[in-house]
Image (tube, rainbow, N blue to C red):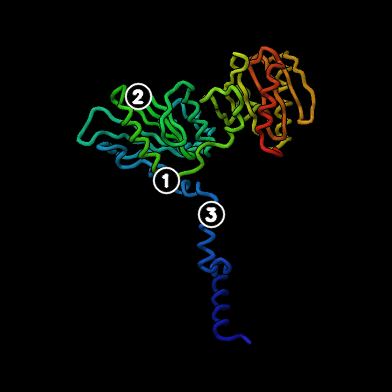
Amino acid sequence: MVNGEALLSMNRRDSLKGEGVRPGLFFMKPPLAVLFVLALVLVCPSLLAAEKAVEALLPDSCAAGWVKEGPVSTYTRENLYKYIDGEAELYLPYGFERAATVMYARSGGSASGLVVNVFEMGSLLDAFGIYANYRSPSVYRADVGAEAFADESELMFFKDRYFVQITASGTSTQEPSLFLACAGSVAAAIPDGIAMPWELGLLKVPGLVPGSEKYFPEGLLGHGFLGKGLTADVMLGGAQVKVFVLLRDSPDGMERTVDAYAKYLRDSKASPQVSRNDRGTSLRTVDPLFKGVVLQESGRYGVGVAGLKDLHEGDGLIDQLLARLPKGG
C-alpha cells in the first residue's frame, strides 16, 4: 500500500528521469552535499586556483600609488608567440595554459612603469621548471611566493602553478621595495598551495649547489629520448658534476629509455658498459657531450651522474640518489 506522500515522491522521481536528471544526486541530503564539497576543498585546494581566471590575479593596484595603465591582455597556447615571439616554444612543454599581462604606472602619470606577466602553467612542477630557466645560483633571492629572485630591473617568482615576471619599463632600474610590494600583491591573489615540488627532494644529496636545480619536461641533457627529469649541480672532490633523475610512468618505460640511450651511445661509437643488478640496468659510458656518465635504473626512475673524470667516482652519489627515491618506485 503506497501512501500519498510516497506516491508524490515517486512521481517526482519519474519526472526527473524524463528530464535526464539523476534522482540520487538531486535528492542528496544537504548536509552530505556540504561535506562532499568541503572534502574536495580540503583534499584538492588547488581546485580553487584552477577556477580563478589568470587575469583576476592582477590587482587594480600593485603597490601604493601604482595602478593599472590600460586593460589586461591575455594569451593562450595558440597566440602566445605574438607576445613573446621566440620564447613561446620554451613555455609550451611546461603545460602553459594562459597568460595575462598589464602595465602599472604611478597614478597621476609617469614615464616609467612596471610590466607584470602572469603565466598559468600545467602544474606546480611545471611552474618551478619555467622559473628555474631564468634563475641562477648566484642571483639575489627575494622573500615572495614559493621562491623568487630579483635584481635592479626585474623580479620573478612562482607560486602554485603560476609563474610571475615583473619588469621595469621606461627605465633600466626600479627600487627593490617597489618590486617586492608589487610581487606581494600578485602573490596574495594566488591561493596558497604546496610551497615547493616534492620532486626536488630527489636531488638533495651532499654537495648540492643551492639554486642549481632544474626540471625539464622533455629532452633531458639535450637527448630527446631521455624525456623528462630533474638536474642539479653537485660538488664532488673539488670538481662540479651534474646529477640527474629521469622520471617515467612505468618501469617498462624506464627500461626503454635506458635501451635507447645505450643504442645512441653505440651508434656514436661510445662503447657503453651495460650490466644488471638488483635495481635494474646499470650503464657506464663516456658520453660524447657529457664526458663520464653513470646511469642506474630503479623502477620507473633512473638516477645518474654526468661530467665524471672517472666512471666510478660517482658511485657514492648514485647510492645517495637511489636512497631518496620513493619506496616501491
Give the amino acid type for the residue marked by disc 1 in the picture: Ala
Q: 156 and 248: which one is in front?
A: 156
Left or right of 89 in this view: 238? right
Q: Quadrant of residue 157?
A: top left
Residue 229 appears in which quarter of the rendering?
top right
- Position of 214 relative to 289 (above/below): below
Q: What residue would you read off at disc 1?
A: 53
Mark yes or no: residue 78 visible: no
Pointers 3 and 2 in contact (C-beta within 8 Å):
no
Tag 3: amino acid? Leu
Say which mark, if any, is on residue 40.
3
Q: SS at mark 2? A: loop
Residue 67 visible to an observer of this rendering: yes
For residue 317, above or below residue 286: below
Q: Quadrant of the C terminus?
A: top right
In percent of width and height, residue 270 lies at: 72, 14
Local SS, label 3: helix
